[in-house]
Amino acid sequence: MSRVTSNALLLLLGLATGLIALKGTYLYYVRPLLLPWLIVASVVLIALATVAIVRDLRRFGTADGDEQEDGHRHRLWMVWLLLVPIAVLAFVVPPPLGARGATPEVAAAAAPHRRPFPPLPDERAPVVSVPDVMMRAATDSAGTLDNRLITVIGFTINDGGAVDLGRVVIICCAADAQLARMRLTGPGLTGYPDDTWLRVEGRVVPGSSTAQTSFVPTMTVSSITKIDRPANTYAY
């Protein structure tokens, strides 16, 4: 790889990193707390590439005229070709992982060790994340979900006639994504295609999270509201 190509790649990588950070689409790939590191990486890459390009331009300025012109045209063609990834990032944004994009399922409750969880907020229907519902239903010895009306937000997963509510959980980035899910029962659950985002109120059925259900709890639904996909679709 020539120096011109390597410098152009370095610059484009820095620009691409900065672009996804500015547009907010970095949330499709990594946790929000990594944003400062993305910005620093983008600035460093752009600075290194700029210094290298300026240095090479000064050196090439002393080369033979005809040789310099031919090489310049060749280098410009490669640089324009390498602009394609930037255009793709600017106009083609891949969707975040959804119902069929994250496997395997969350395995945190595969061998549950029961312990008391802190009580839920003293509200009519506090919002509880899908992975938190899974963990509490499987391992909470204090019974904080028992007979509690809660609100859960997630996307639908149609599974052989049943409907689950899911949320993709990431530890660091989308590469380690796992799927947290819970089974929904009650009226009004049909007609929602996969990846439909819902706000669901209901109560978790006591004892529904067992080894026989792969520690997937069941919620009896009392109300359903269809919502837009949130800006940040992942749970942490």
Image (cartoon, rainbow, N blue to C red):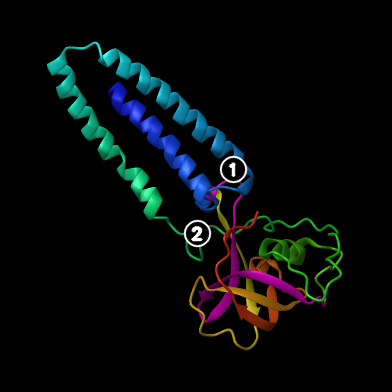
Q: Position of residue 176 (x, y in %)?
A: 55, 49
Q: Is residue 156 one of those drawn in magenta? A: yes
Q: Residue 46 location in percent, x, y?
A: 45, 30
- When the figure is inspected, residue 184 is found, relative to residue 232, above or below; the finding is below
Dominant secondary structure of the residues highlighted in magenta in the image = strand
Q: Position of residue 70 (x, y in %)?
A: 15, 23
Residue 173, magenta (yes or no): yes
Label 1 vs label 2, nearer the camera: 1
Residue 57 vs 14, above or below: the answer is above
Residue 218 lies in quadrant: bottom right
Q: Which residue is mark 1?
A: 35
Amino acid bearing label 1:
Leu
Q: Reply above or below: 212 against 27.
A: below
Say which label, 1 or 2, has the lower sequence index.
Answer: 1
Question: Residue 97 got which mark?
Answer: 2
Residue at (30%, 13%) from the top-left corner? 59
Spatial CA span between label 1 and label 2 = 19 Å
Determine whether the residue tagged by mark 1 lies in a helix, strand or loop: helix
Mark drawn on residue 65: none
Q: Amino acid at mark 2?
A: Leu
Residue 57 coordinates in the image, percent (x, y): 31, 19
Label 2 crowding class (10 Å Cα cut-off): few <14, some 14-19, many 20+?
many
Taking the image as shown, residue 163 lies to the left or right of residue 112, namely: left
Q: Where, quadrant-wise, is the N terminus in this rendering?
A: top left
Determine which quarter of the picture holds residue 92: bottom left
Q: Which residues are magenta?
A: 147-175
Residue at 78% from the left image edge and 70% from the top image edge: 126
- Pick the residue in front: 59 or 135: 59
Q: Is residue 63 left or right of residue 127?
A: left
Q: Residues within 10 Å of mark 1 (few under 14, many from 20)?
A: some
